[in-house]
Image: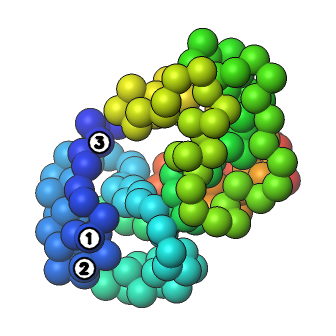
Amino acid sequence: MAQPFRVPRSELADPTKLNRAVAVASRNVRGPGGVLVLFDADDDCPVELNAKLQGTVCDSRCRVEIVVANREFEAWFLASISALRQHDAVQPDAAYAGDPEQRRGAKEQLTKLMVSPYREVRHQPAFCSLIDLETTWRNSRSFRRLVSALQRLLEVEPPPWTL
């Protein structure tokens, strides 16, 4: 896997800038795989935004999958908050009831479940390594979209917990 790189959301929502970013990323693809574009929907409809942008990507060097996290990427952490309790920054009794993708503010909700404020750069890598994939898949529609996109990019069978 190539090193991921960040592009502002405003650029990813613009078809010309999205294609430029995909072209840069696709230069690093070797063998099977492709480019995964992942960003927050914020207040946009993730299904509509995905459909609009997927049709504008025109890089034939590799496969490209676009995944739009419903509201915020951090909603996936809320969907698997019980697994994050093992991190020392998360309260040992942290729990989140309800649909983590229903409204914006996942970062703020996450901070309420932590002993110190949530910081993207500091906490995202650690939390990504701790989430329970099955629980997150069960609790988040946009995470299910991510799993499907990765299956297509990597040409692998679906995980058993998705069947």
Residue at 41% x, 79% y: name it: 54
Helix, strand, or loop for circle 3? loop
Question: In the rendering, at what x and y percent does residue 58 appear?
Answer: 25, 79
Q: Which residue is mark 3?
A: 4
Q: Are marks 2 and 1 in contact (CB under 8 Å)?
A: yes
Question: In the rendering, at what x and y percent does residue 140 appear?
Answer: 71, 56
Q: Residues within 10 Å of mark 2 (few under 14, many from 20)?
A: few
Q: Which residue is mark 2?
A: 14
- Nearer the viewer's eye, disc 2 or disc 3? 2
> Which residue type carries mark 3?
Pro
Residue at 25% x, 49% y: name it: 6
Helix, strand, or loop for circle 1? helix
Indicate how the structure is coloured in the image: rainbow
- Which of the two residues, 162 or 116, is positioned nearer the viewer here? 116
Q: Are marks 2 and 3 in contact (CB under 8 Å)?
A: no
Residue 151 against residue 70 in the figure, above or below: above
Q: How many marks?
A: 3
Give the side of residue 61 with respect to residue 51, left or right.
left
> Label 2 to label 1, Cα distance in Å?
7 Å
Q: Which residue is mark 1?
A: 10
